[in-house]
Image (cartoon, rainbow, N blue to C red):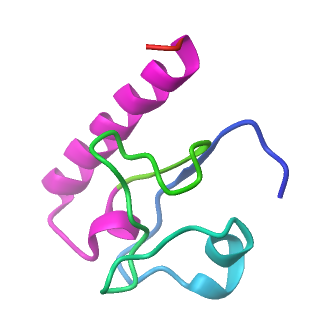
Amino acid sequence: IKADLVLLAMGFTQPVAEGVIDVLGLEKDARGNVKVNENGQSSNPKVFAAGDVSTGASLVVRCIASGRKSAQGIHNFLTGR
């Protein structure tokens, strides 16, 4: 997959690794979720993940907060901050 930036945000179940997650070579945590840093950035610096794909099934308010955090991380990445 060739892209300048990818944002992953997927439903209520554990992410299916046999697809874009494996193709992008993303690191996963012990529970099989996409591993991200404090900015929502994955092991591939051009891929950000938010919500259930990075935390596992959670409350919608936590997923919204995760999305906002990743959005700020994307902004910082794109603007060089």
Residue displayed at 40% across by 84% down: 32
Residue displayed at 44% across by 76% down: 28
- Residue most extreme to the right: 2
The total number of labels drawn is 0
Q: Is residue 11 left or right of residue 47?
A: left
Q: Name above or below for residue 73 compared with residue 35.
A: above
Within the magenta stretch, is there residue 57?
yes
Q: Is the magenta stretch mostly helix, strand or loop?
A: helix
Q: Is residue 55 left or right of residue 43?
A: left
Q: In this view, does 49 lie to the left or right of 37?
A: right
Magenta region: which residues? 51-79
Residue displayed at 14% across by 65% down: 59
Residue displayed at 33% across by 44% down: 67
Image position, residue 5 (x, y; %): 66, 39
Image position, residue 13 (x, y; %): 38, 83
Q: Closest to the observer: 26 or 64?
A: 26
Q: Name above or below for residue 41 compared with residue 56.
A: above
Quadrant in the picture for the C terminus: top left
**Residue 54: which quarter of the image?**
bottom left
Image position, residue 57 (x, y; %): 25, 76
Image position, residue 1 (x, y; %): 83, 58
Q: In this view, does 80 lie to the left or right of 11?
A: right
**Residue 34: which quarter of the image?**
bottom left
